[in-house]
Image (cartoon, rainbow, N blue to C red):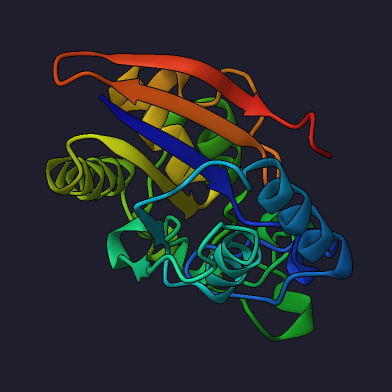
Amino acid sequence: MLTIYLTRHGETQWNLENRLQGSKDSPLTEKGATSATKLGKRLKDTHFSAIYSSPSGRAVQTAQYINAHQPAKNTPIITIKDLQELHFGEWEGKTKDEIGITENQNNLGRHNNTPNHRTEFQNFWEEPHLYNHEPHQGESLVAFKQRVETAVRKIMSENLNGNILIVTHAVVIKAIMSFTMDIPTERMWDGPFIHGTSLTIIKWDGNQFKYEILGDTTHL
């Protein structure tokens, strides 16, 4: 039996500023570091044979805080590129307001060819199956979900039993839930909300997935 412990990175500076991070990065805030430490303390009696992380600094930092409370304190942290957050293209580093602003203002004499991304941003969160990544040069949800599933299944093939930890991102966790719970893209954002350093525990017996905990934050 393989038990997968799954968490999202702690709060970052861009989270506070309401900026979309995606493949870009910003450091953990003091709260983010504290939350990761609290999760590490919660898991201090759980021995992980391996810790897998997105290569983004915010995820690696979170993994390190958790690892500091492991019994051996030297569990290997393995970064996997395909666990990185969805790439949002031109939206990355911008606030929601900046993404939704219409800049076709000829009277200003600038940005008159800049598309208004309000519709696609709304589609992403409300009708994800209709989301079009191309106008802002992002990553398609189809390709994203496939790369995440491939990465997780490879991790599973290398760990047939025991406990492993995966530290990644909110949309990645939703993608993992999609294939392990057979959730279609149009229902991808169904609850629960994946908070920073929340804990999800999945059991895999070689045939089926069983969720023990989903997005739990009692340690916070």
Residue 123 seen in the figure: yes
Residue 213 placement, left or right of 159: right
Instruction: Give the vertical position of 82 relative to 43 (above or below).
Output: below
Instruction: Give the vertical position of 190 relative to 22 (above or below).
Output: above
- The quarter of the rendered structure image containing the C terminus is top right
In the rendered image, residue 152, in percent from the top left (x then y), is placed at 25, 44
Residue 143 placement, left or right of 181: left
Q: Residue, x 75% and y 58% (percent of image)?
A: 37
Q: Nearer the viewer, residue 138 or 79?
A: 79
In the rendered image, residue 75, in percent from the top left (x then y), is placed at 43, 65
In the rendered image, residue 132, in percent from the top left (x then y), is placed at 38, 45
Residue 130 seen in the figure: no
Q: Residue, x 44% and y 16% (percent of image)?
A: 211
- The quarter of the rendered structure image containing the N terminus is top left
Q: Quadrant of residue 175?
A: top left
Q: Residue, x 29% and y 41% (percent of image)?
A: 145
In the rendered image, residue 61, in percent from the top left (x then y), is placed at 61, 72
Q: Quadrant of residue 95?
A: bottom right
Q: Residue furthest bottom?
A: 109
Q: Quadrant of residue 87?
A: bottom left
Q: Nearer the viewer, residue 105 or 152?
A: 152
Instruction: Give the vertical position of 27 relative to 187 (above or below).
Output: below
